[in-house]
Image: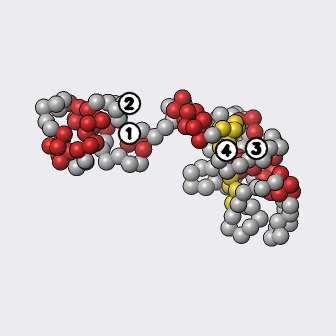
Amino acid sequence: MTIKSLSDLDVPSPRTGKTIRETFSSSFAVDPKTGCWNSRSLDPKGYGRIPSGKRGMKLLSHRISWQIFKNELLVPSIFVCHRCDNAACVNPDHLFKGTQLDNIRDQVSKNRQAKGKTNGQTKLTESEVREIRAYGFSKSERKLAKEFRVSKGAIYPIRHRITWKHI
C-alpha cells in the first residue's frame, strides 16, 4: 500500500479504528544512548513495519515517519535513508530523503556494501581467492576455474583485483 495523500495518515482503519499516525506513535521505543527510535515490529531485513489498516498489508515505518514529521508525501521511487545505519530507526532526525543512487553512495561511503563472502552470490571463500592469486599466472583460467568449481570468467576479475578488492 502506498500513501496517496497525507490525509491518508489520519483515516481510521475499519478494522482497528486507529489511524496510521496513531499506530505509528505507539510503534517504537527510544534508545537514550543512540537517539534512535527503534520500531518494535521488524521485517526479516530489520526494517520497521506497521499495519496499514488493510488485512495483511504493512507499511515501512521509516517512510511513514518521514511523511508524518516532514509533512511530505513520498513517491515510491524516492528512498528514505538512515544516517544512523539502523534499519529499525524511525527518528526523523536520523533520516534523509534520496534516490537509489544516493542510498548506494551512502552505503559505499560507509563501507557497508556487500562484498566477498557477504554478497550472497559468491561461491568462493577468502582463502580460496588468496590461493587463486597465489598461483599468479602459472595456471590457466580454465584450470583454476575447474579446480575451484567456478566459471572461467570468474577467475580473470579475481586475478586483476576487479573483484574481491578488499583481499
Q: Secondary structure at mark 3?
A: helix
The reply to whether dot 4 and dot 1 touch (C-beta < 8 Å) is: no
In the image, which disc is placed on residue 158? none
The reply to whether dot 2 and dot 1 touch (C-beta < 8 Å) is: yes
Q: At 82% from the left edge and 65% from the top edge, which residue is drawn?
A: 13
37, 56: nearer the viewer: 56
Horizontal and vertical percent position of residue 114: 46, 40
Dot 3 or dot 1: first in sequence order is: 3
Q: CA distance from mark 3 to mark 1?
A: 34 Å
- Name the residue that disc number 2 marks: 166
What's under tag 2, amino acid-wise?
His
98 with respect to 125 (left or right): right
Note whether 91 is above or below 167 in the view shown: below
- Name the residue that disc number 3 marks: 66
- Name the residue that disc number 1 marks: 116
Dot 4 or dot 1: first in sequence order is: 4
Q: At 83% from the left edge and 51% from the top edge, which residue is drawn?
A: 6
Q: Quadrant of residue 138?
A: top left
